[in-house]
Amino acid sequence: MLCALLALAACHHDADPPPMHPREGDLPPLPPSSGTPVGYLIDNAGQLNLHDDQLARLKEIDQSLAARNDEIDTQLRIIEKPDEDPPPGPGQPPRRHNNAPGAQIKTTADAAKLHDAHKANDAEALRKAFAVFDPPQQATARRLLEDRGITASASPIAARDIGHPPEPRST
């Protein structure tokens, strides 16, 4: 009888834990469609109070950015591909690796140029996106991006200038 009770207790499975709900102030994870900084702004169209024409323009900017960055990302995957290890000799243990993300990537000068081009594409797209917004939307967009660790300084209007028109550039 004692064995039956022990076996029954050992086979007891707890129900799956309840799903976690974000608390007030917690940031939910990025949605899967946010592959670009402009895509993240599109995903937050409700918070930005975007008009239909603004949303359409942002989608055009995002598609253009995604196409340009896709080509760069393809080249980066080829350049930064980790080297294949030769098989270990007889009686030798396999090589150990640092499996931290990016630890095995060897960056070259060409890869650095591609990373810079990627950043420049993002900065240009953000400048175009911020030009679509009115000043209150710019402030909200900047906050949304900075909350996610995306530097919004690439926008044409610095945080201190929100609400003031940009000064003309002298050439």
Image (cartoon, rainbow, N blue to C red):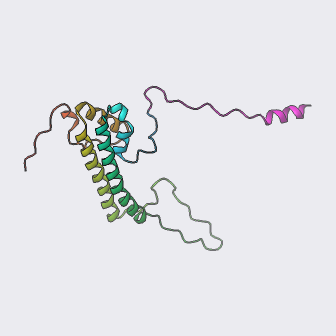
Task: Name the image quarter holding the N terminus.
Answer: top right
Does the magenta stretch mainly form a helix, a strand or a loop?
loop
Q: Nearer the viewer, residue 99 or 125?
A: 125
From this viewpoint, which residue is outermost toward the right? Answer: 1
Give the residue drawn at x 27%, y 43%. 129
Q: Nearer the viewer, residue 13 or 124?
A: 124
Residue 6: x %, y % from top left: 84, 33
Residue 141: x %, y % from top left: 30, 36
From this viewpoint, which residue is outermost toward the left? Answer: 170
Give the residue drawn at x 21%, y 38%. 158
Q: Quadrant of residue 114?
A: bottom left
Q: Quadrant of residue 107?
A: bottom left
Residue 143: x %, y % from top left: 32, 34
Q: Is residue 22 magenta?
A: yes
Query: In screen coordinates, is 111 left or right of 24?
Result: left
Query: In screen coordinates, is 14 left or right of 137?
Result: right
From this viewpoint, which residue is outermost toward the bottom? Answer: 90
Q: From this view, report whether residue 121 is shown above or below residue 2.
A: below
Total number of numbered discs in the rendering: 0
The magenta-colored residue range is 1-26
Q: Nearer the viewer, residue 74 or 113?
A: 74
Give the residue drawn at x 77%, y 34%. 12
From this viewpoint, which residue is outermost toward the front? Answer: 52
